Image (spheres, grey):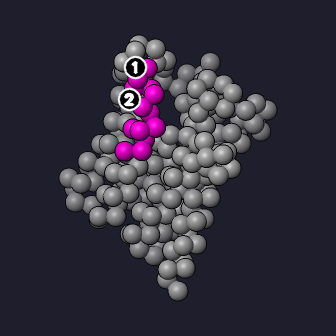
Amino acid sequence: MVWLTWVVIIILSYLLGALPSAYILVKLKNNIDIRHFGSGNVGTTNTARAAGTGMGIAVFIVDAAKGAIPALVGLHYSGWLAAAAGLAAFIGHLWPIWLSFQGGKGVATGFGVGVILTPWLALISLATWLIISIASGYVSLGSCVATVLLALQMLVTSQPLPYILAVTIMAALVCWRHRSNFQNIRAGTERKSFCKPS
């Protein structure tokens, strides 16, 4: 039954994406709750600020894998399932059942999905993220621009419809999750750093 396979993969993708890697890794190494430090976000940037750049990089890699693995499994069946599984993992990261649905902002997990769907376009977006984040000092700005760029690249290069839909939804959610950061930028209160440990 094809539909049952889809349901199982999508549910498992959500549960994998929902694993709070920042919370788990920082708790194991430093015995602290990352949610009580800095912005309280369970993502790469706050982890780097609270526990050091090395830990931030480790969280980025694990979070990216959470998106890449489901998309890769789904790709074995169809492009639609690859997009759906990747999106489910992304949703799991944003709203993890394990942390009362209070998760990260999805940049690394979305990148992991993008690497499987369109590797070269995802790498261009990663380079854009690095350039803007370093040049401006605002990781939030680099994150939003990079994810929107990935969606636009997919549209312009006529990638498969499910890929475009999934990445467009992820880009919209990434920007929405960073809305408080943009408010802080306008107010001049946003912390200006590029993954610097505190």
Q: Is residue 198 above or below residue 41?
A: above
Q: Is residue 85 left or right of residue 46?
A: left
Q: Residues within 10 Å of mark 1 (few under 14, many from 20)?
A: some
Foreground residue among 23 and 132: 23
Image marks 2 and 1: residues in contact by CB distance under 8 Å: yes
Query: Which residue is drawn at the image coordinates 49% and 18% (left, top)?
Result: 191
Query: Which residue is drawn at the image coordinates 22% and 60% (left, top)?
Result: 158
Foreground residue among 96 and 82: 96
List x then y, in percent, for residue 75.
44, 69
List x then y, in percent, for residue 112.
48, 51
Foreground residue among 126 and 164: 164
Q: Is residue 156 magenta?
A: no
Q: Is residue 155 left or right of residue 101?
A: left
Q: Is residue 123 above or below residue 14?
A: above
Instruction: Give the amino acid type for the residue marked by disc 2 in the picture.
Output: Leu
List x then y, in percent, for residue 26.
71, 35
Under circle 2, the secondary element is: helix
From the viewer's perspective, is the residue at label 2 or at label 1 nearer?
Answer: 1
Residue 52 appears in the picture as rendered: no
Instruction: Give the amino acid type for the residue marked by disc 1 in the picture.
Output: Ile
Query: Which residue is drawn at the image coordinates 34% and 51% (left, top)?
Result: 168
Q: Is residue 115 left or right of residue 67?
A: left
Q: Read off the residue under disc 1.
A: 185
Q: Read off the residue under disc 2.
A: 141
List x then y, in percent, for residue 63.
56, 47
Which quadrant does the C terminus fall into?
Answer: top right
Q: Is residue 2 above or below residue 137?
A: below
Extreme residue toward the bottom, this view? 1
Query: Which residue is drawn at the image coordinates 41% and 13% (left, top)?
Result: 188
The magenta stretch is 172-184
